Image: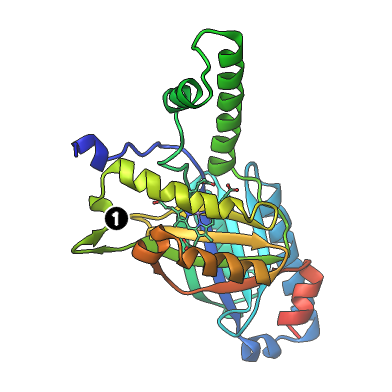
Amino acid sequence: MTDKNLVPVVPREGWHVLHLFYKVEHGQWSVLNPDEQREAMTGFTELVAEIRETESTQLLIFSVVTPKADIAFMLLTPDLHTANIFEKRLTLALGPDVLTPVYTYLSMTEESEYTTSDAEYTLTLEREQGLVAGTPEFEKALGEFSTRMAKYRKDKLYPLLPLWEVFCFYPMAKRRIVGQNWYALPFEERKKLMSGHARVGRTYHGKILQLITGSTGLDDAEWGVTLFAHDTFDIKAIVYEMRFDAVTAEYGEFGEFFIGLSVPLDELFRRVLP
Ligand code: 76R
């Protein structure tokens, strides 16, 4: 095991990501008269539009299921100052003390440490497909691989999030106890274990869209896990199935889970500000 195995280089790229969960203070909201309530909802709607018009910025809004929270925001933006300004404004957008933060999470988009490099893929082409470096077949296969990886990398660092119906968020970390310490494993072993994880994940293609954002040094856990689905059954199924995969079974630590539904703003207001 060399130092290189233990200390990866962390690329300085990506966007900041805020997951913000609020409760509506119904007592405070009911003190506002109908005109003030309308004004608050208009101001909120305008702020949402302003954020969504900001360059390279995405704001997703969910109605949270269960009284753990009422409204969830997921904000992605390159600059932390922009994130900070919008986050303060969102908190106050429906009037002072109407929204109380109940859970928040700061992370950043990141690409995986375990992706296949061109050099590794070259070996696969040579050994498993019998292609010879320098031949047109080889160059074509390697070129296709590089294009695919460039897109994959872009999707991880600069994701364009979909408007799927179900949203699930929870923080995660990898276990670090004596005899079971993820970070003490050699890189090759971690990579092998992660490929099993990804294999399970890929069977949910089209049903689950996962965004893993890194939060070491930024928040309590090591990653924020955001899952989008069309159906809660798929969320339940993938999280359960992964419990049996070696990485999760031996090294997965989970934080609190939140489930939200993607609804238009007028429907959100009807649901959470009755
Ligand atoms: O990034 C990729 O899409 C390819 C490989 C991959 C990585 C590196 C991958 C694939 N994941 C990766 C990293 Mn994942 N993932 C989770 C959960 O862990 C649990 O038991 C539950 C939480 C789910 C449901 C899930 C789904 N993944 C990670 C990491 C960071 C680990 C690290 O860097 O050490 C965590 C914490 C994590 C957790 N994973 C996939 C999925 C799915 C659906 C895929 C396939 C994506 C695809 O190929 O379309």
Q: Is residue 221 visible from the viewing direction of this image?
A: no
Of residue 104 and residue 170, the one placed in the foreground of this image is 170
* Vertical side of 28 occupied by 217: above or below: above
Q: Is residue 143 visible from the viewing direction of this image?
A: yes
Mark 1 CB within 8 Å of ligand 1:
yes
Q: Which residue is drawn at 40% across and 55% down?
A: 215
* Vertical side of 150 occupied by 73: above or below: below
Q: Which residue is drawn at 65% across and 88% down?
A: 26
Q: Where is residue 81 in the image (x, y as percent from the top left)?
A: 48, 50
Of residue 62 and residue 230, the one placed in the foreground of this image is 230
Helix, strand or loop status at disc 1 = helix
Q: Position of residue 7 (x, y in %)?
A: 26, 41
Residue located beneath label 1 in the image = 182
Bin the neighbour count of mark 1 within 10 Å (Cα to Cα): few under 14, some 14-19, many 20 and up. some
* Vertical side of 132 occupied by 50: above or below: below
Q: Which residue is drawn at 47% across and 53% down?
A: 197
The picture quadrant where one finds residue 262 is bottom right
The picture quadrant where one finds residue 4 is top left
**Left or right relative to 70: residue 170:** left
**Left or right relative to 220: residue 265:** right
Q: In which quarter of the image is the N terminus?
A: top left
* Vertical side of 155 occupied by 143: above or below: above
